[in-house]
Image (spheres, rainbow, N blue to C red):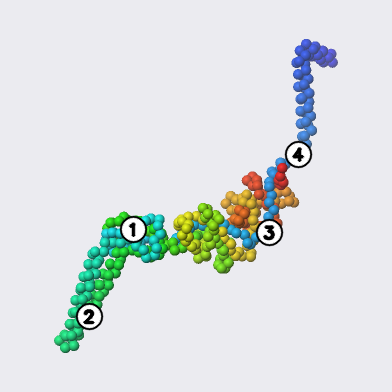
């Protein structure tokens, strides 16, 4: 006991000898230490507070079977043809310019016709001689001077000369190529004054009496093509969005794309003389078509569309009872005129997450964000 009192007395004397500021700093440190120990002790039995991620919700509305779907279309010609001569020779005329439209029947290219004109003249003279020989053989046969075989031989020679003349005239006609339809000249494959052989491609042209517009349609919308009269489609070009062009249904493929599982649908578009449309251009196709009754779809914000690890589309449905979210697979059907995504696979009474999707997981509790 005496030793303890002696130690305390020594410590007090040592403390009294310290500077006044050092004594104050020591008492402050001691007080802070006591406060920290008290706080640690008071929270040791409490559970950590869960941090909820705020998300923005969107109330899904009623299905709208009159919504417009937008597709990316590609303009194409009715057909693309490489024109060629069926005979050989030297090109003397090639008046077409690339990028111009040649009316049906107008000249595309011509060969030097001199040799073929001579061949026609020769065939005509030979046919005249065969006519005289045949008349002489008939006269002799009637008088009994020649046999039936001689008369038949003269008739055959006459027929062969007529065939030769027809062939020469046809070959002369083959020295000129005319446009088989209203043709857009896409490329000249040879130059003027080139010697070409038969069936050598000369000019590539495209049939633009009307244009074709192709779109890819998902399989769940193909049922509406059973009623082609109810399809309403129009093409909208980016350069003149205020002047849509009416389209006419032409045909659709029945074999899907091996990768995208979509079907190609083709529409006809009339050629506008005042607007330069070229094959290969892209265009937005606004399509209204009959949709099977069992296919219900809903308009949702594009920001509400997410995709899983396999790349399939989904949305996150909010469960108000538990305050959590669960994923729901959906099918994308396109966009409506307001730019909202049209999806199938919902009931129409859900609240879905429309912002803050990238960090969600199944069963995650969230905090609906209602604004600042």
Tell which circle, 2 or 3, labels the residue nearer the N-terminal end: 3
Mark 3–mark 4 distance (CA, rounded to whole Å): 43 Å
Task: Note whether 317 is above or below 42 in the view shown.
Answer: below
Task: Note whether 153 is above or below 60 in the view shown.
Answer: below
**116 sits to left or right of 326:** left
Secondary structure at badge 2 equals: helix
Residue at the spot x=44%, y=61% of the render? Answer: 208
| Residue carrying label 2 | 155
Tell which circle, 3 or 4, labels the residue nearer the N-terminal end: 4
Tell which circle, 1 or 3, labels the residue nearer the N-terminal end: 3
Tell which circle, 2 or 4, labels the residue nearer the N-terminal end: 4
Secondary structure at badge 1 equals: loop
Secondary structure at badge 3 equals: loop
Is label 4 or label 1 in front?
1
| Residue carrying label 3 | 62
Q: Position of residue 317 (x, y in %)?
A: 68, 52
| Residue carrying label 4 | 47
Residue at the spot x=49%, y=62% of the render? Answer: 269
For this orientation, the residue located farthest to the left is 145
| Residue carrying label 1 | 95
Is label 3 or label 4 in front?
3
Tell which circle, 4 or 1, labels the residue nearer the N-terminal end: 4
Tell which circle, 1 or 2, labels the residue nearer the N-terminal end: 1
Say whether marks 2 and 4 touch (CB < 8 Å).
no
Q: Position of residue 266 (x, y in %)?
A: 50, 62
Q: Categorize mark 1 by other alpha carbons within 10 Å: few (<14), some (14-19), many (20+).
A: few
Quadrant location of residue 243? bottom right
Secondary structure at badge 4 equals: loop
Mark 1–mark 3 distance (CA, rounded to whole Å): 62 Å
For this orientation, the residue located farthest to the bottom is 143
Task: Note whether 249 is above or below 26 in the view shown.
Answer: below
């Amino acid at each position: 006991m005496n030793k303890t009192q002696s130690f305390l007395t020594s410590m007090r004397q040592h403390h009294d000898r310290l500077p006044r500021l050092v004594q104050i700093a020591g008492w402050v440190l001691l007080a802070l230490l006591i406060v920290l120990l008290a706080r640690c002790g008071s929270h040791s039995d409490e559970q950590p507070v869960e941090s909820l991620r705020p998300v923005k919700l969107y109330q899904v509305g009623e299905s709208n079977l009159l919504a417009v779907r937008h597709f990316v279309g590609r303009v194409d010609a009715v057909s693309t043809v490489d024109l060629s001569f069926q005979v050989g020779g030297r090109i003397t005329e090639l008046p077409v310019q690339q990028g111009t439209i040649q009316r049906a029947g107008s000249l595309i290219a011509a060969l030097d016709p001199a040799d073929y004109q001579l061949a026609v003249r020769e065939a005509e003279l030979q046919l005249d001689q065969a006519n005289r020989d045949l008349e002489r053989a008939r006269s002799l046969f009637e008088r009994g001077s020649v046999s039936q075989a001689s008369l038949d031989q003269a008739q055959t020679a006459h027929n062969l000369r007529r065939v030769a003349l027809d062939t020469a005239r046809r070959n002369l006609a083959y020295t000129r190529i005319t446009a088989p339809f209203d043709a857009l000249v896409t490329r000249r494959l040879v130059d003027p004054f080139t010697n070409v052989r038969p069936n050598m491609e000369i000019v590539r042209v495209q049939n633009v009496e009307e244009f074709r517009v192709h779109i890819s349609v998902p399989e769940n919308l193909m049922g509406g093509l059973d009623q082609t009269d109810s399809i309403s489609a129009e093409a909208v070009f980016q350069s003149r969005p205020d002047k849509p062009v009416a389209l006419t249904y032409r045909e659709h493929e029945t074999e899907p794309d091996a990768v995208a599982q979509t079907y190609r649908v083709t529409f006809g578009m009339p050629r506008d003389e005042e607007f330069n449309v070229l094959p290969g251009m892209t265009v937005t196709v606004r399509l209204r078509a009959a949709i099977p009754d069992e296919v219900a779809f809903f308009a949702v914000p594009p920001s509400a569309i997410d995709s899983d690890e396999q790349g399939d589309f989904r949305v996150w449905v909010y469960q108000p009872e538990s305050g959590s979210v669960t994923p729901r697979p959906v099918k994308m059907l396109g966009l409506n005129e307001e730019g909202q995504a049209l999806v199938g696979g919902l009931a129409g009474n859900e609240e879905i997450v429309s912002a803050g999707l990238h960090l969600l997981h199944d069963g995650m509790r969230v905090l609906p964000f209602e604004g600042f």
